[in-house]
Amino acid sequence: MSRRLSALLIALFALGTGWPAHAELVIVAGPRSAITELTREHAEKLYLGRATTLTDGTPVTLMDLPVGPARDDFYLKLAGKNSTQIRAYWSRLVFTGRAMPPREADSIAEARQWLADIPNLIGYLDKGDVTPGMRVLLRIP
């Protein structure tokens, strides 16, 4: 019974936040970026602080969406880690000085603006939030 209640609460939360439960996420770069493609494996390395450059050595800056269902869904789909695991993971990396987490946008609008303005910035959005000119580097089903 508690599993059913949990599933119901998750579904209601997703509906209440306006975030679709099965949104297609995409990793994107802005129109001024030289980045044209990204593998899933390298995206995971970047978003887990294991890499700071592309395979060709190009340095990149990463962007996170605000704390919430979209961000949780992204890390779960990309790295198989829930929000608690990701917070603990990044806390350890920051505490030991090994890496800094992605820059956090306050909203989708701010994320879009950063992508338009900052070369070599990589971020993720719902497919429906992608604007003309953005480069879709990777689809996260």
Image (spheres, rainbow, N blue to C red):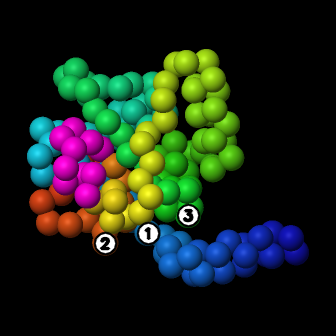
Q: Nearer the viewer, residue 97 or 36?
A: 97
Whole-percent x, y for residue 91 in the image: 63, 32
**Mark 2 element type:** helix
Whole-percent x, y for residue 35 in the image: 17, 39
Whole-percent x, y for residue 46 in the image: 39, 33
Horizontal side of 29 relative to 4 (left or right) equals: left
Q: In the picture shown, does residue 126 fall above or below 58?
A: below
Residue 118 falls within the magenta-colored stretch: yes
Q: In the picture shown, does residue 13 fall above or below 126?
A: below
Q: Quadrant of the N terminus?
A: bottom right
Q: CA distance from mark 3 to mark 2?
A: 15 Å
The span picked out in magenta is 113-122
Mark 1 or mark 2: which comes first in sequence?
1
Q: Are marks 3 and 1 in contact (CB under 8 Å)?
A: no
User: Mark 1: which amino acid?
Assistant: Ala
| Residue that carries the numbered disc 2 in the rendered image | 128
Q: Are marks 1 and 2 in contact (CB under 8 Å)?
A: yes
Whole-percent x, y for residue 139 in the image: 32, 55
Q: Quadrant of the C terminus?
A: bottom left
Horizontal side of 135 relative to 111 (left or right) equals: left
Q: In the picture shown, does residue 115 fall above or below 18?
A: above
User: Mark 3: which amino acid?
Assistant: Pro
Q: Nearer the viewer, residue 40 or 60?
A: 60
| Residue that carries the numbered disc 1 in the rendered image | 23
Q: Residue at point 11% right, 46% down?
A: 32
**Mark 3 element type:** helix
User: Mark 2: which amino acid?
Assistant: Gly
Q: Is residue 68 visible?
A: yes
| Residue that carries the numbered disc 3 in the rendered image | 69
**Mark 1 element type:** loop
Q: CA distance from mark 1 to mark 2?
A: 9 Å
Decide: few, some or many residues near mark 1? Use Cα within 10 Å; few <14, some 14-19, many ≥20.
some
